[in-house]
Amino acid sequence: MNLPLFLAKRIYRENGGSGKVSRPAIRIATIGVATGLAVMIVTVAVVLGFKHTIRDKVIGFGSHIKVENLLTMQSPDPSPIYIDDSTMNVLDRIDGIEHAQRFVTTQGILKTDSDFLGIVFKGVGPEYDMTFIMENLQEGEIPSFSDNKSSNKLLISRIVANKLDLKTGDRIFAYFISEDGVRARKFTISGIYETNMTQFDRNLCFTDLNTTIKLNSWNKGQCSGAELLVKDFNRLSETATNVTNKINRTTDRYGETFTSMTIYEAYPQIFSWLELLDINVWIILALMMCVAGFTMTSGLLIIILERTRMIGILKALGASNGSVRKTFLWFAVFIIGRGMLWGNIIAIGLVLLQTHTGLISLDPSIYYVSTAPMELNIPLIALINVATLLISVLVLIGPSCLITHIHPAKSMKYE
């Protein structure tokens, strides 16, 4: 029979004993552990949700890996690269690549009777994955973009629609300036999307791949590049190396050189900003661990002092210091466990409430999202729970040494 565990259960069932001091001490210790754990879980859920939401939005516009002309990387002027179906098959078969899609960009001006706006036209074909835009579509529909004919349909953002006072079904002229002069095209607004990623929403619209190829005066098969979606984001670096080894420094039929870059290299400022959030998480975790450890230490010391006579009796009956210390450490584990139970219930409840109701709202112009995103990561929550239990118990080993200084003879007279 495990005597320390048996005694700890008896003490715990008595709510720490009959002393008037120990009961509030136990409650405070339980609340401290619950509060600390709840704050840690909610913090991690918010940071994970925020990082993954922003990351997915950036990837939605720029994919995981982009293959372009080497000259495009070195000059602001767009340079075409020839990517035919055989090259697309090569890209699709690279280890780690799930999907490849071509795109063409060109710059133009959207003009209404009262206003105008410079914008980037991104031409896409039927192979382009529009799942991200579909999830953020506010009005209208996504047209069937083509790579061999022009539908003159345009998909614009909410920011552009508000600036130019446009709605779905409206027709608008776009002007394109090149060495050959100014060319005009008339488009119909097919749909309006909103992602809250201001740097993309304010200057990007979608149209047919064939339209942008003609506007750039490029040959059939030439495009700005190809966007590659990977199967596993956690293996992005490995997949990018495979793409580099297969594609980089090769040339197309016109002698143009291929090169590639990852989403991290294309938008380093956004991902550097997201990485800074990890520092805040570690600071909050450390502070909450200190709160839980401090309240548990205070509670254990109070309980030990109030149980001095019991400790003396146990020692007089032959119990060793180690055995008595284990009794109170087991008792502390029960308190920590109850606090952790309530902490998990509160934290997971808050995360689910925010996920389903969007109760906490944010300014999308600053945070890129309209509500605070939260994400439950069960393995990470389990790790936080285990770490909280271990650290709290380890912190209590020191205060439990007070038991070794209690002498049976003196403790009998202790009140």
Image (cartoon, rainbow, N blue to C red):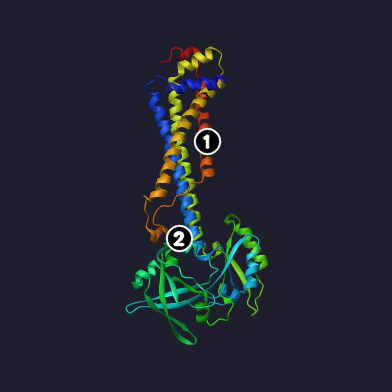
Q: Could you say which is closer to the camera, residue 322 or residue 246?
A: 246
Structural distance between the alpha carbons of marks 1 and 2: 43 Å
Q: Residue at x 45, y 60 (%)?
A: 135
Mark number for residue 403? none
Nearer to us: label 1 or label 2:
2
Side of 15 where 235 appears, left or right: right
Q: Is residue 338 visible?
A: yes
- Name the image quarter holding the N terminus: top right
Classify 10 Å Cα crowding around label 1: few (below 14), some (14-19), many (20 and above): some
- Name the image quarter holding the C terminus: top left
Which amino acid type is shown beneath numbered disc 1? Ile
- Place of residue 167 in the rendered image (x, y in percent of width and height, measured from the top left): 36, 70
Q: Is residue 301 above or below residue 271?
A: above
Q: Is residue 131 above or below residue 309?
A: below
* Residue at the extreme left of the image, as rendered: 114
- Place of residue 51 in the rendered image (x, y in percent of width and height, measured from the top left): 48, 54
Q: Is residue 81 above or below residue 142?
A: below
Q: Could you say which is closer to the camera, residue 228 or residue 308?
A: 228
- Place of residue 130 in the rendered image (x, y in percent of width and height, measured from the top left): 50, 65
In this figure, which residue is indicated by the disc labeled 1? 391
Q: Quadrant of residue 239?
A: bottom right
Q: Is residue 404 visible?
A: no
Q: Residue at x 60, y 68 (%)?
A: 260
Dot placed on the residue nearer the N-terminal end, 1 or 2 = 2
Secondary element at tag 1 = helix
In this figure, which residue is indicated by the disc labeled 2? 135
- Place of residue 33 in the rendered image (x, y in percent of width and height, measured from the top left): 44, 35
Which amino acid type is shown beneath numbered disc 2? Glu
Cβ–Cβ below 8 Å for labels 1 and 2? no
Q: Is residue 375 above or below residue 64?
A: above
Q: Quadrant of residue 117?
A: bottom left
